Amino acid sequence: MNLKEFIKNKENINFVCLDGVSDPRNIGSIIRSAVSFKIDGLIVKERNFPKDSKLMYKSASGCMEYINIFQVPNIKTTMKFLKEKNFWVYGFDSKSKKSFIDVEWKGNNILLFGSEGEGIKKHTEKYADFLVKIDMNEKNREFKYFK
């Protein structure tokens, strides 16, 4: 099933979209997390998705079968299309002032994640309605290695 068919006549849909995430282990971990949070689907750029990666499957820990993966030719065009279909786009940016746990998740949403090094591409970020961050536990920031 393609993305257009999937969203037809549905409400309260939540997607994760990966804009340049390339490490198969990171993608697998994101898939595992998305399944645990009951995300409806993962949107990825078809030519960058490592669909045959054993590392990705291993990192997903058996969750690949439990999520819809939509491989699209262009992330920017897909974001534009989904915004026209009443989706809110939340881009993740560590410099944002708003935490994603403070968002009231209603309606149709897209969680947009950028690449490991550069983050969300500027031409894709302009489709984000909000920028949010994941707050790290302050206690974890002070962690010191055992001697």
Image: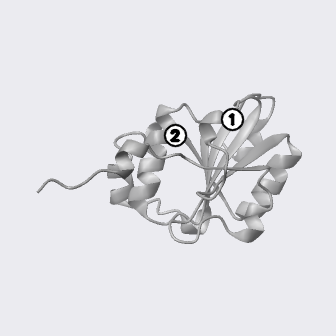
Q: Would you name the residue on which mark 1 appears? A: 103
Q: Nearer the viewer, residue 64 or 146?
A: 146
Disc 2 crowd, CA 10 A, few/some/many (<14, 14-19, 20+): many
Query: x and y percent of residue 17 in the render?
Result: 63, 52
Q: Would you name the residue on which mark 2 appears? A: 34
Q: Quadrant of the C terminus?
A: bottom left
Q: Amino acid at mark 2?
A: Ala
| Residue under the image location 77 percent in, 28 percent down | 11
Query: x and y percent of residue 73 in the render?
Result: 69, 64
Query: x and y percent of residue 29 in the render?
Result: 42, 49
Q: Quadrant of the N terminus?
A: top right
Of badges 2 and 1, nearer the viewer stands: 1
Of the numbered discs 2 and 1, the one sitting upstream in the chain is 2
| Residue under the image location 77 percent in, 30 percent down | 107
Disc 1 crowd, CA 10 A, few/some/many (<14, 14-19, 20+): few
Query: x and y percent of residue 66 in the render?
Result: 48, 35
* Residue 40 in view, yes or no: no
**In what element is the residue under mark 2?**
helix
**In what element is the residue under mark 1?**
loop
Q: Is 76 drawn above or below residue 117 in the view shown? A: above
Q: CA distance from mark 2 to mark 1?
A: 17 Å
